[in-house]
Amino acid sequence: MLKKIVILFFITCFACFNTVFAAESGGMPQLNPEFWISQIFWLIITFGILFIVLTKVILPKISDNLETRKSQILENIEIADRQKEESQKKIDEYEKIIVDSKVKAKNYFNEAREKILDDINKKRTELEKDLDEEIGGVEKELYDLKNKSGEKINKIAAETSAELIKELIGEEVNSSSIAAIVEDQSKLNKERKDV
Amino acid sequence: MASNPMYQFNVYRIGPEIKLGSVDISFTNASLFMVISSLAILIIFNLGAKKKTLIPDKVQLLSELSYSFVAKMISDTAGSKAKPYFSFIFSLFMFVLFCNMFGMIPYAFTVTSHIIVTFVLAAFIFVGVTIIGFMKHGLGYLKLFVPSGVPMVLLPLIVVIEIISYLSRPISLSVRLFANMMAGHTMMKVFGGFVISLGIVGGWLPLSFSVALTGLEILVAFLQAYVFAILTCIYLNDALNLHH
């Protein structure tokens, strides 16, 4: 195997020398000035056209594309940021509304309670006043009745006794004397009661 | 004659002989491949620039990636002042790259394997950069040859070296590209010749070399275009931002 490779190597070297010698006899076409001017001429033309078209037409388009993309991406990022901010603001607002409405509800509740309590108190005081007045009136009436009842009883007693006597005896008796008798009797009753 | 590895670099006339006065400017195979490369660049990048979609398709992505690649290369090496020269460096890079790559197609002609082509490009760059340097800094551009922080004793020597290195820029730039392309293609041709001469028995070894070389040459084709463009940027940087 190794021998084979060594032999191959020598053969290769031999062939190499052969070809290199052959090359030398040919020389370098690069140094032949026959077509130098033609090459320069066509280089200037092709490279010139290439340069002009690239500069005037193609490269501005590419750079424009790149710029557009860059600005669009930046814009999108900006929009996304703005929307994020907005949503954060909305969330804050929402939370604020919730807190506010809670406070408001509490306030309403308190107000309503106070109002109701006030109402109740007011009504109660009114009621109490009314009751007091009525009680006072009734008491006064009772007192008056009590005071007047004695006289009235006497009067009724006198009248009834006068009529009784009239029925019994059949003649008219002096009403004043009857009244005096009734008075005496009622005084006696009173005294007996008192005793 | 076809087995001669230098035969592939022969320039021959295609079509009639065109004469401008006494100068021969006939259309040759070299001209053909210049036209093909330029057209390919224009077609690909025109396709890539045509549509304006937010999400690019393949061709658009390719052209936009190339655009940002060259833009980044320029801004990294020559700074923001080099922006007006972007389109020139872009065209230069693409032209050299496409010429190199088209040269990789079998039986194709490699435009950049000719010293005259690369030398014209390099000389144009050299002259342009020198003009830009003098326009920007006036005679102060000559300070480029006087590096700061050099002892007085060494200064004359350094200045001479700097001037020589500056003047040899177009030569080094052109020869680097031309020699790389020529050497690579010659080597491939030589190994291709071995495959034929060694036949079915011994031809496999050079054939595998040839396959490996093809990959290497594609890498070199890209790399040399990149080096050509980036050296242009570096020279431009010297002319624009004089900070030697």
Image: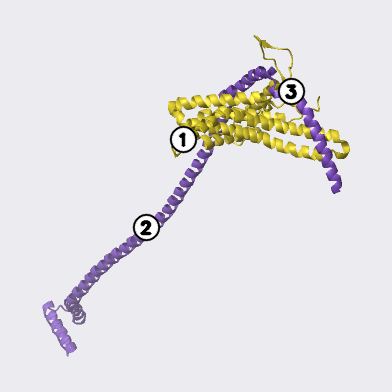
Chain colours: A purple, B yellow
| Residue B49, horizontal then vertical, whole percent | 61, 29
Q: Earlier in the sequence, mark 3 or mark 1?
A: 3
| Residue A75, horizontal then vertical, whole percent | 50, 38
* Residue neighbourhood size for the residue with mark 3, other residues' Cα within 10 Å, grouped as few (<14), some (14–19), many (≥20): some
Task: Identify the residue shown where x is 60% and y is 25%.
Answer: B121
* Residue neighbourhood size for the residue with mark 1, other residues' Cα within 10 Å, grouped as few (<14), some (14–19), many (≥20): some
* Residue neighbourhood size for the residue with mark 2, other residues' Cα within 10 Å, grouped as few (<14), some (14–19), many (≥20): few
Q: Residue B182 bears which disc, if any? A: none
Vertical order, B108 against A117 (above or below)? above
Q: Nearer the viewer, residue A151 or B162?
A: B162
Q: Is residue A140 left or right of residue B123?
A: left
Q: Which residue is mark 3?
A: B10
Q: Which residue is mark 2?
A: A108
Q: Which residue is mark 1?
A: B155
Vertical order, B115 against A37 (above or below)? below
Q: CA distance from mark 2 to mark 3?
A: 103 Å
Q: How many marks?
A: 3
Q: Chain of mark 1?
A: B
